[in-house]
Structures are given as C-alpha cells and as structure tokens.
Image (tube, grey):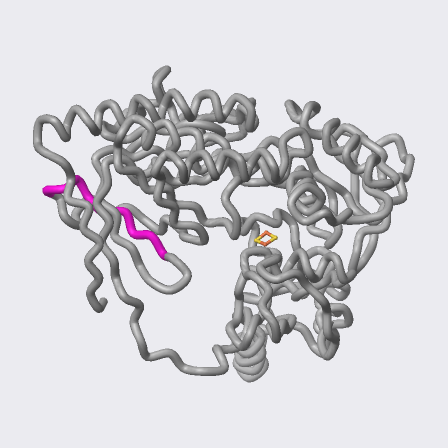
Amino acid sequence: MEGQTIRAFTSESVAAALVASGERVLSRSLKYHRPRTFFCMEGHCGGCLARIDGVPNLRACQTPCTTGTTIEGQNAYPSPEIDLFGAVDFLFPRGMDHHTLMTGSSILNNLASKVVRQLSGLGKLPATESHELPAVQLERVDVCVIGGGPAGLAAATAAASSGASTLLVDDQLRLGGSLLADPRLGVAVADARVAAAMAAGVRALPRSTAIAFFPEDAPEDGGVLAVATPDHLVRVVARRWVWATGGYAVNLLFADNDRPGVLAARGVGRMLVQHGIAAGERICVVVGKGMDDYANALAEALRGARVDVTTTSADQVERARGRSWVTAVELTSRRRLDCDVVAVAAMPAPASEGPRQQGCRTVLDPARGGFRVIVDRDGRTSTPDVFACGDVCGYVGPMAAATVGARVGGAAAEEALALARELGPIATTAARRGA
Ligand code: FES
C-alpha cells in the first residue's frame, strides 16, 4: 500500500477505494500481530483502522477520499503485508501471557516489561498538535431519531410529516443504513427515502455519532444527548427520542475467523450495492441461522456480477485457511472450498447501547440477534419519552423495519405535539458557544 497512488471517486470511503485497488492488509493486531483489515464496512468493527492524513486510528470505511489523502498502515514493520513482528503469532501458537513473561529473573523481567510497553498501543501520535476545542451547538427538537437506516428514515419522515420538528442523527458517510447493503433495495430506494425525509422537513446530521446520553445535564429538559459531528459537538434536547440504531454485523465461530478476507456478508453487500465493487472473484457465502433470505439475495446479486459463488451453512464451517488473506474454508466433512472472500451472513446484534443508557429494558434473545430493546406495538420502551424501532428491537430486516419505523415515528410525534400544545413549542435554538 505505502508509496503507491490509488484512484478514487470523491467522497467514496477510503476503504472502498482501497478494496477496488486490490489493497488488503491495513494493520496488525496489537499483541500477536495478526493481519487486520475491513470486516463490516460500516464503522463498527475497528478492523480498518489506519493512519489517514497524519491522524492515527481513523476508520477507513468512514473516512471520505479527497484529493491528496494519504493512508498509512499501522502497527507493522516494515509493512502490514510483511510484518516481522508477525513472528509472535507463529512462535506462540497457543497464546502468550506477557504478564508472566520472564518472571524468573528481575533483570530479564524489567527488560521484558520495557519491550512490551514499547510494543503496546496502536498507532503513533498525530503529526500535528491540536489545541482547539470544538465548538458546541445546542439543538432543541420535538423528536430526535438516532439512526438513518430504513427504520430511522421512516420514523423521521413520519414524525416530520406530522408537524414535529425532527432531527435525524446518523453516523455513516451516507444515509440509508442497511438499504445500501441489500441488493433487493439498494441505492435508488435509499436515496428516494432520504429525499422523502428531507421533503417532509427532517433536518439530518450525517457522519455524526450519538456518543452518550447525560440525564444530569439540563435535567429540566430531561437530559442531553451528546452528538459528535466531524467538526463540532451538538447537545441535543428532545421531547421524544426514537432509537433506530439497527444491528451490528457480527462474525460466526470457526477457527481463524479473523483472517483478512473473512468479511461480513453485509459488508460484501455494501461494497457491491453502494460502491459497485465485487469484493472477490470466488466468494463463499456462509449462511447463519435466520439469514437465508439475505444470503440468497446477496449470492444471486454476486453471481449477476460474475462472481463465482458457493454457499454453505455456518454449522459446516470448521476453519478459514490462508495467512495474510483467506484462500479457502474447510468444512467439517473435510471438504475444502477454495475462495478469495468468505462472506459471513450472521444475524446482526441489536445496537442497543444508547437505549440501555436511557434505562430502556432489554432482553437477551439469541434468535433475534442478542440483547434487544423491549417495546410495545408503537415502539414505546420501558423509559417514558423513549421509543425504539427496527433491528435494535431484534432483527427484522430492512423491509419490516421501515414499516414499523413509520408507525413508531408517528406515535412519537403525536406525544411530542401533545406536549407542545400543553407547554408551548420547543425553542429550536441553535446557539453556538465555545467549549
Ligand atoms: S470499522 Fe471499518 S470495516 Fe469495520
């Protein structure tokens, strides 16, 4: 990767540009220096961390390309592809407990501790110091929707259409969520739903992460949601909250499932649908429980893009093969499927941290992906003023998520507007002040 120039479309993610250029390993893992690269393509796995324009540990899949962007690998010498420290993985195949390394002699132990300290940490400090704290903006709205996928777009559109001032917070480079990874829906559907939301009056904060909810901050307003945008912080106060954060792409359990080239099926779908990139030439789709529909749709779309596709069920996969990139999967039947990408279709895990922070009750439901938020028919959670919809309440897929989202957004707006009639409209100030 280093020293080479790659071509990219403006605003395309750095990750997409690298994949399209055939770049593979981006960094090495902290301890065993195993190769690391893209997995989810939606900003949630941390596999694509790289040094971009002198800033360490940026997610390549959430960083847009601009002319002259420089990308460097991390935690490897001399390069992420060929890393001398990768010998650690080879020399300690059963693992290494560095806490007990060379404890027989205090001199050797001090030496070992020094070396371990030198090797720990990911990335080097930024090339330039930053002394400026970001500005802070205050947003007060009737309804705040977190998550710009099918459920969130539908909820925000319904809320704004009812007359509620509505803010939509989304952490991705482009609004659309899982619509942009599903060949049955795709970019045109996502763009149409975004256009409908904007036409209804939704104000969107794209590339913005809901960091945390602070109930003790402005308690008279019910608390504040802190949102980090690319260049400033936003404190959001809302009369009703709608969590539509969807689910995280997860991996399945088999040996060496962390090999580069083992990708989330949704990441492979996102590359194909959003970026027009086939992630590999021979792709093995591994189908987890409850994911047949999506896996079949993806396999069909990949075949349409002239990819050689095989499918196998998750319980048959024993191990991924390959060192710096996957070359095959071995099955329990001792068969071997040669491939250059393994697309893991596992049920997404509900992204329920935000609602849990607001005190919403969850239940562990493995058949729906993990800890899902408990809601009533209209999306009311156990916490007053807080709603949730879509995959964060247990995996339902993008089609059903949109239907539920519209209903929940309407219910949240109804409550917020009833409050407005009682207390008067919420002041939609957007004052900025230094932090
Ligand atoms: S965070 Fe970028 S690929 Fe997962």
Q: Which quarter shows the C terminus?
A: bottom left
Vertical order, 333 against 322 (above or below): above
Q: Between residue 83 and residue 112, name the one nearer to us.
A: 83
Give the image quarter of residue 154: top left
Give the image quarter of residue 292: top right
Q: Is residue 371 visible?
A: no
Q: Between residue 102 and residue 170, name the one nearer to us.
A: 170
Q: Between residue 192 and residue 58, name the one nearer to us.
A: 192
Vertical order, 331 against 63 (above or below): above
Q: Which quarter shows the N terminus?
A: bottom right
Vertical order, 419 against 178 (above or below): above
Q: How many marks?
A: 0
* Residue 222 drawn in magenta: yes
Q: Is residue 231 visible?
A: yes
Residue 169 is situated, as x and y percent measured from the top left of the image, at 38, 45
Kindly give the residue lying farthest to the front in the view shown.
Answer: 199
* Residue 207 drawn in magenta: no
Q: Left or right of 308: which side holds 225?
A: left
- Rendered residue at 45%/40% (across/down): 148
- Rendered residue at 22%/62% (across/down): 432
Residue 8 is situated, as x and y percent measured from the top left of the image, at 68, 63
Give the image quarter of residue 385: top left
Magenta stretch: give its range: 220-228
Residue 246 is situated, as x and y percent measured from the top left of the image, at 48, 35
- Rendered residue at 61%/57% (across/down): 12
Residue 280 is situated, as x and y percent measured from the top left of the image, at 81, 48
- Rendered residue at 54%/39% (across/down): 191
Vertical order, 296 against 283 (above or below): above
